[in-house]
Each structure stands twice: as structure tokens, then as C-alpha cells.
Image (cartoon, rainbow, N blue to C red):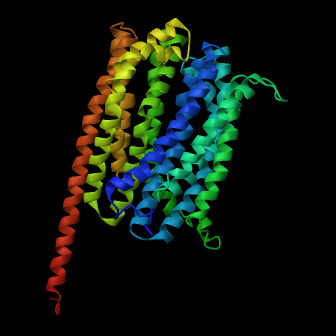
Amino acid sequence: MTDTTDLTTRPVSEVIRQVAIPASIGYFFHTMFNVVDTWWAGHINTEAVAALSLSLPVYFIITSLAGGIGTGATALMGSALGARDRKQASLIAVQMLGFGVVISAFLAWFGLKFSPYIFGWLGAEGQYLDICLTYMNPIFAFNFTTVFLYLFNAILQSQGDTKSFRNVLIFTASLNIALDPWFILGGYGLPAMGMAGVAWSTVLLQACGCIYLAFKARKTGLMKTESGRNLIPRPAIYREIAHQGFPASLNFMTIALGFFVIFRFVSQFGPEASAAYGIATRIDQIVLLPTIGLNVASLTITAQNYGAGHIDRIRETMRRNLKYGAFILLPLSLPIFFLAEPLMSFFTNDPAVISIGVEYLRIDAFVLYAYVIIFISTSALQGMKRPMFAILMGLSRQVVAPLLLFTLFTSFMGYGTISLWLSIAAIVWTSAGIAFWYARKVIITTEKKYYFKDKQESTKTLDTPGSV
């Protein structure tokens, strides 16, 4: 029987399909979950959509830390599994969960204390601020449902299992269609909760997902406590997880910081502009969905093959992922350009919101494949235990360059929102070129290192007395 948890020997195209297809399907439903939230918020009022959009970068604080730790631990567990050391992989898995408890407690304290100031800095005040806090306070208070959803999935993903997370995302997205209107509007014993209902629906469904993934992760055998020994916090393991995970977290965090920067400038043009950008980014997510699995495959397959020393398979994995991404995404860019207006109209009937959103989407249609190049390249680097590049790339792409260009075009030159969208396009394509160049350079350098290492070992064997 073929070992589907071993990604180091079977054909690369086969293991990419194994990991990428379920992951892409799962993230499709994850995005549908968010689309349903946005659609129902749009039926409350424009301020509710703007509040949900403004909450996205704040929510990213949670997903950044959880996703980063999961990504870092996936790289470590995958490398251990590739080296056939399940005992070490099990120790990392249990230590990761203990680390997650600490992170979850910190996030609850941080979010409930500081989110009013964050939203205020982003321009929310009065009723607008109240709606933002109504949504985010339950999310922060019960953030452990989000954190452990990512961590249990990391255990499964390190072994090539993306089907379990797919199942959770399908289940939660499907139920959200019913829970959102029920919790928002009330009925059947529940009071009408408005925007708070969107948050409580999310918390409840993620809690159900955690229970299922915990059961699946336990069945892998990587959650062994070794009579409680693995539960004892190991500072060295925590540092190793932090070393790999925090750079990945910071990489995700730069996305949140990027949203902060963008919304800081977009909000200068009113709630309509914030709502338009929030809706347009949801549409972005939908279009990019078929390629999300390629990012997951890039990380997971690279991690195991890096541990096994199969650098040629890493090169082939990256090449195939970029090729598949082009075949999938480039044909989807045309509908975004030509159908921008009806796509925006699906979420809102506010003409000002639609107009700004169309302006963004018609520029963004030519940028989407650049995101694929960035994500696949950085995932490959993380799989090879080189997480720092993603931080530098994220900070320059999401924070430094936008701050400079946005300030120049809007504050000094007085241009409108179109200058923001054109700046984003230029930044993303430049970043894609740099990410691809650096990932390719690291693969070539690592390949040479392994080649000379093997050559030296062969020479030593030949020089050994009695060797043939």
C-alpha cells in the first residue's frame, strides 16, 4: 500500500494533486464563509460592511500568529518526518499545542484591551467604532477556536493531509449560510444580534471544527504525550518553533499591517471607499482560491523533501506549482476585468461603493498572477527553513513601499483612489520578481551544497581501508 504521508518518493505531480486539490477546495469554502458574512453585513447597512472590512486587518492579528506558528511547526514536523524521525515530529506537535495556549491567552488580553485604539487609529469613531467592536470582541475573547483550528491542521498538513481541513471548511461554510441570518435577525428563541451575530456564528462553527480536527490529529499518532513527558514545556523546542513560526507570523502580520496602511489612506475617501476595498478584496480571494492549494503544497512537499535531502524535487515542485498557477489563474483574470461592475453589485447597491470597487478590480485583474509567484516562492523558502525572507518581503511590500507611494500620491500630489490601486500593482509585480529570483537562488545554492557533501562522503568511503 502506498504511504500517502510520505511526500519524498512518489511523483511530484501526484503529491501536488494530493495536497493542493483538497486545500484549494477547502479554502474556496473558507472564502465563501467570508463572502456570506460580507453579503449579510451589506443587508444591514453600508457602515456594517465598512466595519467588517475594517475588522479584517484586526482579525489578521489572530490568524497571523496562529497561522505562523502552524506554518513554522509544519516545516519542522515535515522535516522530521522526511528524515524518518516520528518521535521528534511528535514532540514538536505536542509542544506546538502548548505554545498555542500561551498565544491564545495573550491574544485575548491584547485584543480586548487595545482593539478600540486600533480601530480609532484606522478612522472608526462613534457608531462606526461600536459596530467594529461588537464584531471583534467575541472573536478576541474566544480566539482559541481560531488558533487551535490552525494548529491541529498543521499536524495533519505536515503529513500531506489537507482533506480533513477541507471537510471542516465545507461544513462550517455550509452551516454559516443558515446561522448568519438566524443570529443577525433572531428568531426561534434567539434575540436579534446584528453584527454580533456574525461574530458568534464564526466562534461556534470554528469550535465545532476544532473538535473534529483534534480527533483527526490524534489518530495520526503525532499527539503522543509519552506518559506526560512531551507535555512538559521544552524551552529549546519553543525557541525552535518560535524561530520558524514567528517569522511566518510576522509575514502574515505584514499582510495585516498592509491592510492597516491601505485602510488608513482609503478611509480618507469615506466609508464608501473602505466598503469598496473590503468587497473587492473578497472577490480577489475568490479568484485566487484555485491557487491557494499550490501554496500549501509548496510548503508541505518542500519541508519533507528538504528533510530527506531531495533538493531536485523541491526545484520540480516550485516549477510545477508556478506552471499550474499560470494555467489556472490567467484565464480567470479576464472575467474580473469585464465583469467588475456586476461582481460589485452582487454585494452592494450603493453606486459610490460600486464605482470605486470597479476601479480597483480592473487594475487588479492584471496583478493576480504576481501574488501566486510571491506566495509559492515564499512557501518554498519557509519549507527550506528560511523564513526571514518572507518578513523582509512582507514589510517592504505591505508597509514601507505603500506608505511612501500612498503619501506621495494622495497627500502631496492630491490624487484619488486610483493612485492607490496603481501603486499596489507596481509594488506587487516588483515583489514577485524579487521573490522568484531569491527562491531560485536558494534552491541552486542548497543543491550545490548537497552535491559537494555527497561527493565528499563518497571520497571518504573510497579512502577507507578495505573499501572497494
Residue 126 seen in this snapshot: no
Quarter placement of the N terminus: bottom left
Q: Residue at x 17, y 87 (%)?
A: 464
Q: Residue at x 47, y 25 (%)?
A: 283
- Quarter of the image for residue 218 reads bottom right
Quarter placement of the C terminus: bottom left
Q: How many marks?
A: 0
Residue in the foreground of this view, choosing between 340 and 242: 340
**Is 62 situated left or right of 304 in this image?**
right
249 shown above or below 184: below
Q: Residue furthest right?
A: 189
Residue 303 picture location, percent across and down: 38, 57
Q: Residue furthest front?
A: 1
Q: Residue at x 58, y 33 (%)?
A: 33
Q: Residue at x 56, y 27 (%)?
A: 35
390 shown above or below 184: below
389 shown above or below 399: below
Residue in the foreground of this view, choosing between 371 and 30: 30
Residue in the foreground of this view, choosing between 266 and 407: 266
Residue in the foreground of this view, choosing between 329 and 424: 329
